[in-house]
Amino acid sequence: MSAPVPLELGITRSPGTSTPGKRVLLAEPRGYCAGVDRAVETVEKTLEKHGAPVYVRKEIVHNRHVVETLAEQGVVFVDETDEVPEGSVLVFSAHGVSPAVHDAAATRNLHTIDATCPLVTKVHQEAKRFARDDFDILLIGHEGHEEVEGTAGEAPDHVQLVDGPDAVDAVTVRDPSKVIWLSQTTLSVDETMTTVQRLREKFPQLQDPPSDDICYATQNRQVAVKAMAPECDLVIVVGSRNSSNSVRLVEVALGAGAKASYLVDYAREVDPAWLEGVETIGITSGASVPEILVRGVIDLLDEYGFHTVQSVTTANETLVFALPRELRDARH
Ligand code: SF4
């Protein structure tokens, strides 16, 4: 196997030992976003400060490797607050929770630390504000996703979920002049715009959110995949099946011209049959994916003669979020 691939922006490994024609395109940006980075660090610092066990409601972020690694360090993942012993430390995940969950934690006297991504919190604030103004809020998102449950829970009497363009027909509102759409942060930009267009045909006075709800990280990763997909025989997306933004990257890759695209948690899930007759492979990863997992895929492809790695860079991300207040002294 060849030496490790340098992953700095724009670096291309010399094709010296490459099999002719075989190359890897590496999307940039990919992987961890600022919200995931903050959420994972929040759990790590909580463990340092309070010791194990630390309880986390739901998966802190939707990635198998991250969850399993934290569980080995003493984190206990639970579905609901009533599984947490009274008085324990409980972290809320990056996807956010509804006020009802905060209340349930308070009744059990839990010490809560909120790792909700600030960009999800922003959507919660929008939901509260437009509910106060008595709008019908059409929340575009995936039924059952934790983020959507948290956002809808801010104003259950005003929010109705619209799960894609096909759900528009069933939407009814009280007053068509007071309707706004909001969205989950990790959707496909293109599909969401199709849903909005259909909603607007039905409700011409539909208002737009004050700012984009689909977050910068989701949008940037989709733009990078779109840039490389037309050249790719195959796009491998590293990410978990319950990660909304990772699943969207597969769809975006296929929609932008990749001949095939698959989602894998680990390099070992790459099927050698996918590589037959393939020359250009694109690699990207969802916003909850540590870089070590991408490196594993690059190393595996190296064994199959894909020694040349070229970055396809469409944006540089520098955003960093502060940790929750009580942990700020712990960040180095
Ligand atoms: S994907 Fe976007 S909304 Fe979700 S944690 Fe990352 S930055 Fe926040």
Image (tube, helix red, strand yellow):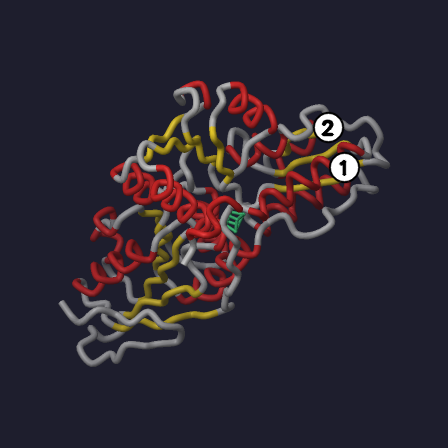
Q: Is mark 1 on a helix, strand or loop?
A: helix
The residue at the point 47 percent across, 47 percent down is: 245
Q: What element carries label 2?
A: loop
Q: Viewer-proximal residue, 145 or 168?
A: 145
> Residue 152: x and y, percent?
63, 30
> Residue 224: x and y, percent?
48, 63
Q: In which quarter of the image is residue 136?
A: top right
The residue at the point 32 percent across, 37 percent down is: 51
Q: Viewer-proximal residue, 188 or 22?
A: 188
Q: Which mark is residue 158?
A: 2
Q: Earlier in the sequence, mark 1 or mark 2?
A: 1
> Residue 329: x and y, percent?
46, 52
- For this view, does 184 lie left or right of residue 323? right
> Residue 137: x and y, percent?
72, 34
- For this view, does 71 lie left or right of residue 191? left
Q: Viewer-proximal residue, 140 or 210?
A: 210
The residue at the point 36 percent across, 30 percent down is: 77
Q: Is mark 2 within 8 Å of ligand 1?
A: no
Q: Is residue 310 above or below residue 256?
A: below
Q: Quadrant of residue 23?
A: bottom left
- For this view, does 78 lie left or right of residue 213? left
Distance from the alpha carbon under mark 1 to that under mark 2: 9 Å
Q: Mark 1 points at which residue?
A: 130
Q: How many labels does the image show?
A: 2
User: Where, quadrant-wise, is the N terminus in this rendering?
Assistant: bottom left
* Labels 1 & 2 near each other (Cβ < 8 A): yes
Label 2 amino acid?
His
Q: Viewer-proximal residue, 295 or 22?
A: 295
The residue at the point 41 percent across, 33 percent down is: 56
Label 2 crowd bin: few (<14), some (14–19), many (20+), radius 10 Å: many
